[in-house]
Amino acid sequence: MRLNNIIDRIKLPFRKEKELFSALFAILGFYPHNIEYYKQALMHKSIRKRNDKGKPLNNERLEFLGDAILDAVVGDVVYRHYEGKREGFLTNTRSKLVSRDTLGKVASEMGLGGLLLSAGHSTSHNSYVEGNALEALVGAIYLDRGYDACMWFWEHRILGKYINIDKVAFKEVNFKSKLLEWSQKNRVRMEFEMLKQKKDDKGNPIFSFQVKLENVEGEQGTGFSKKEAQQQAAKETLQRLKREPQFVDAIFAAKTNRTKMEEEPAMAVPDTEQEQNFIIEQPRKQAAAQRPVRQSTGDEEYDLSDISATPKEKSREEIIAEAEAAAVAYADE
């Protein structure tokens, strides 16, 4: 009974390794020479494993190597596939093919997430982790079989099966529109600031733009046109919004400060009651002298009781004439 247990323990690692060989053959199209490279490529840093020398054992170094190899391999493929196309088009196409989103989708379709070793959490829906593992896998292929094997893997196991290179090359994603949609939805002010404009050695114009969200500096973009530069800046800013929560926090903090300032009154509301300082005060005598004189219409009843008696009785017409003369004389004083 004890002997059977020992035999089962010996068989178990071989069985697991055989399963890994089969799974890798389904992905790669060939069997590994040195399985250890591929084991490390599928080892996420979260497991915190170390080698005999105490150094971390994970796929980060292989990811770095695979990233460089992929740039060369995909650049080679794109260069030969699009004869006569400008450098800008070739660079843009290569960037799309090796982007985190593209590699993440390819790795997910391959089923690479199911082979990843991580510390207790599933990586099956984490496209970035899977995309990084695919880069590490390319690094493992390079160390195990060389550059030609990496080229064969890309051309025969990825292109045509998981990626249509022409669809990727000519698909225009409007990153500027996506960023504008995000900013409008969150009521965030967005602008593109042109940093510089120059010409390269061949006389082609080159533009550089930077995104600003609530005056917080986003990413920069460079291109042969303003549109291309803004698109690149918008794309990099969108990626930063995804991966840096601190960047998002800074934007919304700036937005809060702006809206708070807009809501507070800049100064006290002015009084609408204006001081009546346009009236010139007059001395009493002068004011009395300037009072308008009431004009007689000839119809008024006059009280003659205060008029001094005269030896000769005056007629009504004479009394009125004297009163008018006195009024005129008073007004002319």
Image (cartoon, rainbow, N blue to C red):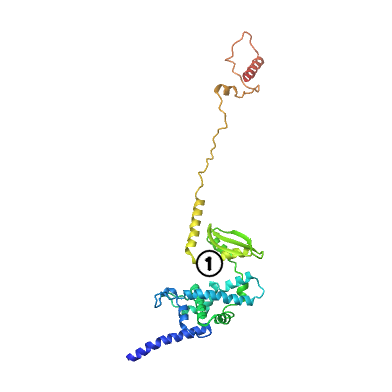
What residue is shown at x 35% (from left), y 91% (from top)?
Answer: 4
**Residue 320: % across, % down:** 65, 17
**Dot 1: element:** helix
Identity, as a three-letter code, of the amino acid under mark 1: Gln
Residue 129 lies, with reference to residue 6, above or below; the image says above
Q: Nearer the viewer, residue 297 or 39?
A: 39
Residue under label 1: 239
Q: What is the residue that sits farthest to the top in this orientation?
A: 311
The answer to whether 216 is drawn above or below residue 43 in the figure is above
Instruction: Classify the position of the C terminus by image quarter.
Output: top right
**Going 60% across and 71% down the picture, which residue do you hit?**
91
Q: Is residue 72 left or right of residue 5?
A: right
Of the 4 image quadrants, the one containing the N terminus is bottom left
Picture quadrant of residue 98: bottom right
Report the side of 239 relative to 296 (left or right).
Answer: left
Residue 240 visible at all: yes
